[in-house]
Amino acid sequence: MAWRDRRGALRAILTGSACVRPASVYDAISIRIADDLGFPFGMFGGSVASLAILGDPDIALITLTELAEQVRRMSRAAALPVVVDADHGYGNALNVRRTVEELEAAGAAGLTIEDTLLPQAYGEAKPQLVSREEGLGKIKAALDARRDPNLVIIGRTGACSITSLDDAIERALAYQAAGVDALFFTGVKTRAQLEAISAATTLPIALGSPPAELGDFDHLAERRVRIAVQGHAPIAAATEAVFKTLSAIKDGAAPKALTGLASAELMDKVTRADVVAERGEHFLGVKR
C-alpha cells in the first residue's frame, strides 16, 4: 500500500461511523503482527517510542531523528497506516514544522501534536500546559508544514486532567477552527465530559485510554469518537516474555525446555521468510 493510500485509509476511518481500536506498534515485528491480524491502523505512542528506542521512561528524552527513523523502519516493514504521537513537536512552532516534515517523509499516515509543556519544567512535579496561544501556534505550524494533503493532523489536548473541561473545549475549538482533521483528548473520565466535548465540537474525536465508563464502543461512536486508544500492552507483554525467557536461561533451562516462544511458523510469517526465499531464488539462484 502506497503512503498516500495508507493516509486515505486512515481518513476513511475518521469519516466513518464506527469507533475503532488501533494496535499499539513500536517496531517492524509488532507492526507486521498487527497488519496480519487485520487491525485497521497502528498507534505509535510517545511512551512506547521511548521504551523501544531508549529503554527510558516517557520523560521527553527521545529526539525527533530517533522517532522518525523508527517510523521509517515500520513503514518499510508493513503497509499498515500508523498514527504517530509526535508529543509537543520537539520544541516551539518552528520545530513542529520540522517534525511534520520528517514524519511525513518517514511514511506516517497521521500524527498528533499536543499542548503539554515538555520537557517537564524545573521544580514542577505535575504536568503543565503551554498557553492556548502557543498551542494554537504549534497547530498552525503543523498544518502549514504538511505537503501531502492526505496526511492526517490531529490536535491533542490534555487539559481535561490538567486544567479543566472548559479549557479543553476552548483549546479544541481553536484547533478545529485552524483546520485539523480530528481532535484528541486525554484525561476524559466520564460520559458527561464526553457529551460536553461532542456537543461543542464537530470533528472526529480520539480518546486516549478511556476508562471502563467509556467502554461502550457503540456509545462512543454515537458521540463521534472514531479512535479509542487501548493503552500500550504489547510492549509490556514483550518485555515480560523476554524477562521470563532470559531468567529461565540464566537459571540453566535447556533451549528445548523454554516455554512461551513463537513457533517457527509464526517467526517465518512475521519475518516474511517465504518472500525472502523467493527473492533469493529469483535473484541469487538459490534453490529452495
Image (cartoon, helix red, strand yellow):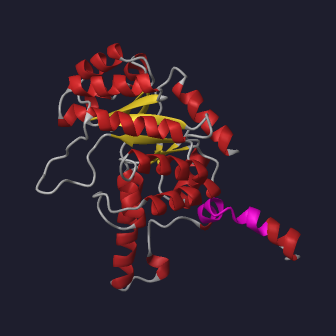
The x, y position of residue 22, in whole percent, is 47, 40
Classify the position of the N terminus by image quarter. top right
Classify the position of the C terminus by image quarter. bottom right
Image vertical order of residue 262 relative to residue 200, above or below? below
- Residue drawn where x is 19% and y is 37% of the image: 162
Instruction: Note whether residue 229 is visible.
Output: no
- Left or right, 114 with reference to 98: left
Q: Which residues are magenta?
A: 265-277
- Left or right, 57 with reference to 284: left
Judged from this view, the residue extending furthest toward the top is: 199
257 in magenta: no
Image vertical order of residue 62 relative to residue 255, above or below? above
Instruction: Note whether residue 11 is visible.
Output: yes
268 in magenta: yes
Image vertical order of residue 52 relative to residue 175, above or below? below
Q: Give the number of callouts.
A: 0
Dividing the picture into quadrants, the one containing residue 222 is top left
- Left or right, 108 with reference to 248: right
Q: Main secondary structure of the magenta part?
A: helix
The x, y position of residue 71, in whole percent, is 53, 55
Dividing the picture into quadrants, the one containing residue 177 is top left
Using the image as rendered, state which of residue 196 and residue 218 is in the foreground. 196
The x, y position of residue 121, in whole percent, is 18, 53
The x, y position of residue 113, in whole percent, is 40, 41
Using the image as rendered, state which of residue 233 and residue 130 is in the foreground. 130
Dividing the picture into quadrants, the one containing residue 205 is top left
Judged from this view, the residue extending furthest toward the bottom is: 252
- Residue drawn where x is 70% and y is 45% of the image: 2
